[in-house]
Image: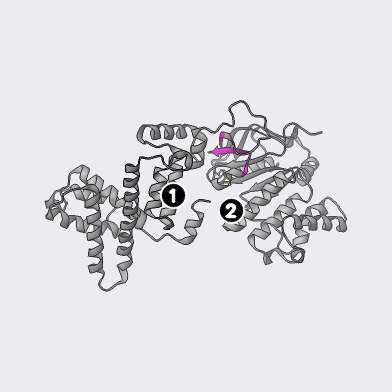
Amino acid sequence: MAHKLDIHIDDLVITYNKGKANEFNALQHIKGEIYPREYIILFGPSGCGKSTLLYTIMGGIPPESGHMWVKGEDIYAYRPQDMNRYQQSVIGIVYQQFNLIMSLSVLDNVALPRLFLGRPPAERNARASELLRRFGIPERLEDKLPMMMSGGQQQRVSVARALVNDPEILLADEPVGNLDSISSHHVMESFLEVNEKYRKTVILVTHNAAHLPYAHRVFYMRDGVMRRIAVNPAKAQIKRLKPGEAIETEIEQLTRLYPYLDPIELKVKSVVNFATQEVGFTELENMERWVLEVLKGSIDEETFFHFLSRRTSNGGMGLSEETSRMMAKKVFKLVAHSQDVRRFRETINEDDRFMHQKRYIDRIIEYLHQEIGVDASLEQKIVLQTAVGERVGGILKATEFEEKLVLPFHLDGAAFREHEAYLLARHLEKLIAQGGYKIQANELKGAHS
Ligand code: ADP
């Protein structure tokens, strides 16, 4: 009989090393409900208890208290033979490390769980073969050892193996944690297919926020506690929702920007933004996309200006023409001048490095002067030159730099006023942040996936 819920996690507590000095509550009073054919992501920072929850669903870790109901049955009340049947044919699992048997062929790896069910060779091989095809593994690779395949292919073999006994629930523990971004994408698409086309419940553990859009609902965990269960507003839901449950609020938007924060911390961000900034999070997200293009060097100042002055609903910032001009100029100037920080650092092995370095430092100081409008005396400029050189060269820390600027001359300081020192330090840090190192092509690719 089909049960209304696939999984009902009921006030579950998991304790490791019970009664020993290192006793540890890895899960604390966890509650949750998962419906048939839902795609659920267990999400949270490393060590928050995601894998523990997954292996508890698998029947591998008896709870200290509470219950794990799967299809209406308390799995920890099972006799050993019932637990076997459950693990062989109700659930399948995919591990981060693939866990394929390296001495068996790809086909035998996939067919093995069927051997344990006592199925005849022809039947189990045909089934394994069919599944391999579904996940894009060609027939010619069936006789090969897993080692001869790429990581992404091996993981798709493990997905086929996990499904060979046709379980209703597929569990996955960081399944793309060891894969490059292209293979990750293929494997993540395979899980989506398992959920949508083969109509399986998928429960996937990840700490990568980029995966969240795949799920119907995300279970956010932290420190062994279920902090919040969030509905993905972009997917048609399987669970029947309460009115208002799927409306995208600013909090949901913030969740994407700051995936590890608690609900209360998100509310704090929302208020701080409201009190201190003219623009909201939609505008900031828009701006981030365009600044990325600026840093990649793929748009010019004029294009950036047009974006800033465009309406928010058209993906812009909705700023006045005057403000947009000023802001575009500021950003392009910052990026251009940050190159002097990089050039300064690249002179390290040159013979006449001090001459070059002095030129770059002079230009940086000129930039600071223009941006902040501080009128420095000759004496102040001399100290500033040394201090900027030491900060850019990594000898001074940011706080030490700022402190040095306010010290009096007789203590080797530059005798700037506190506010001037603050502005100089802040602007210099912006240059350093942009110019500290060259952006690599592969970093840019990942930046907005
Ligand atoms: P995640 O999957 O979120 O990274 P885990 O479920 O693996 O987290 O671990 C949760 C916490 O339980 C961690 O602090 C981890 O050190 C601890 N833990 C995990 N397995 C054991 C174990 N077998 N014995 C003791 N502590 C464990």
Mark in the foreground, 2 or 1: 1
- Give how far across and how far down residue 124 sits, in percent: 83, 55
Main SS of the magenta segment? strand
| Secondary structure beneath label 1 | helix
Judged left or right of residue 174, residue 254 is left
Relative to residue 426, is residue 299 drawn left or right?
Answer: right
Looking at the rendered image, the quarter that the N terminus falls into is top right
Question: In the rendered structure, which amino acid carries the disc numbered 2?
Answer: Gly
Q: Residue placed at 31% from the left, 71% from the top?
A: 349
Q: Does residue 393 appear in this view?
A: yes
Q: How is the image coloured?
A: one colour
Instruction: Provide residue 84's location: percent of width, then percent of height.
Output: 78, 44
Q: Which residue is mark 1?
A: 290
Q: Assess mark 2: CB under 8 A from ligand 1?
A: no
- Residue furthest to the bottom in view is 351
Q: Assess whether residue 224 is covered by the magenta stretch.
A: yes
Above or below 346: residue 80: above
Q: Quadrant of residue 40?
A: top right
Q: Which residues are magenta?
A: 214-228
Taking the image as shown, residue 205 lies to the left or right of residue 439, namely right
What's the residue at 67%, 47% (across, down)? 192
Q: Height in image: 232 above or below 447? A: above
Crowd tier of the residue under label 2, counting other residues whose Cα lies within 10 Å: few below 14, some 14–19, many 20 or above:
some
User: What residue is shown with label 2?
Assistant: 177
- Whether residue 218 is in magenta: the answer is yes
Whether residue 208 is visible: no
Graded by Cα atoms within 10 Å as few (under 14), some (14 to 19) or many (20 or more), the crowding at tag 1 reads many
Instruction: Name the amino acid, label 1.
Output: Trp
Rendering coords of residue 322 (x, y %): 32, 43
Q: Of residues 87 and 218, which is closer to you in this image?
A: 218
Residue visible at 29% across and 72% down?
A: 350
